[in-house]
Image (cartoon, rainbow, N blue to C red):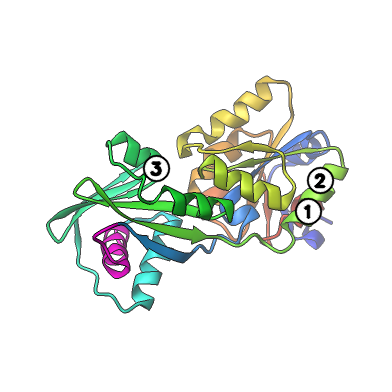
Amino acid sequence: KAAEFGALIRNGDALQQVGKLDVIVLDKTGTVTEGKPSVTEVSAARDWNRDDVLRLAASLEKASEHPLADAIVAAAENSHLELPAAETFNAIAGHGAEAQVDGRKVMLGSRKLMADHAIDTSDLDDAAAQAMARAQTPVYVAVDNVVAGLISIADAIKPDSREAIQRLQRAGITVVLLTGDNQATANAVSGEIGITDVFAEVLPDDKAKKIASLQEAGHIVGMVGDGINDAPALARADVGFAIGTGTDVAIERADITLMRGSLQGVVD
């Protein structure tokens, strides 16, 4: 019967537990959203132009495996920009990355990353606020410890995410959004899909801790995710649901795999 609904049940105990769930945590990227980010705007700071900002950012991101990296590289390639090789690449988990490009130190990531390195972002904070209000992710670019630009990235919400979430809520289940995004972007996304409980700015290693905190508060918790970073949280949850369009690692750690990319499978 589950197969008719596109669900692969790997664990019989999970089927028993599903009926007891009172909280379901949804990872944002690739679960609620399409997981296909795209660059919507590049804002340059004083003394910089759009193409130079995008060229340096994309050169750095070519070495990254982050979902947003592909969007930045694709935008640069669509603009026919030549991308020099990055050297000494270093990923800063949950915050961004840095490398040497054309002999210059390029850093890319969140506002917190900039603040941690005492980089003044005031020139671009208005552009960042506008991006967040549109449920987009703002990514700052700094060169030699001076802010150079801001890249706004959008990831469309899946057409049926809101309906699936409403079905879960009607069934008496509390739905929680979990994301590494900043609080303002997370709030904009949650507003679009009708969720009031949000865990934002969660580092990859802390996702499982968020699940544990809900369990310690007495909840029976389901987790829905698709990425490598979701695997520990899927394993920690009382029932882990993997979106079948996601990574093998997530599918391997989940109790139930949804063969389609839709959240309707969780409700079904």
Picture quarter containing residue 240?
top right
Residue 52 among magenta residues: yes
- Amino acid at pointer 1: Ala
Q: Is residue 115 above or below residue 140?
A: above
Q: Secondary structure at mark 2?
A: helix
Residue at coordinates 62% horizontally, 31% vertically from top-left?
211
Quadrant location of the N terminus?
Answer: bottom right
Q: Secondary structure at mark 1?
A: helix
Q: Which residues, given as a range, are shown in magenta? A: 46-63
Mark 3 vs mark 2, foreground winner is: 3
How many other residues sit within 10 Å of disc 2, few (<14), some (14-19) or many (≥20)?
A: many
In x, y percent, where is residue 236? 60, 33
- In three-dimensional space, the C-alpha distance between marks 3 and 2, rounded to whole angstroms, equals 34 Å
Residue located beneath label 1 in the image: 164
Picture quarter containing residue 215?
top right
In x, y percent, where is residue 28? 60, 49
- Amino acid at pointer 2: Leu
Residue located beneath label 2 in the image: 168
109, 254: nearer the viewer: 109
In x, y percent, where is residue 155? 56, 60
- In three-dimensional space, the C-alpha distance between marks 1 and 3, rounded to whole angstroms, equals 33 Å
- Amino acid at pointer 3: Arg
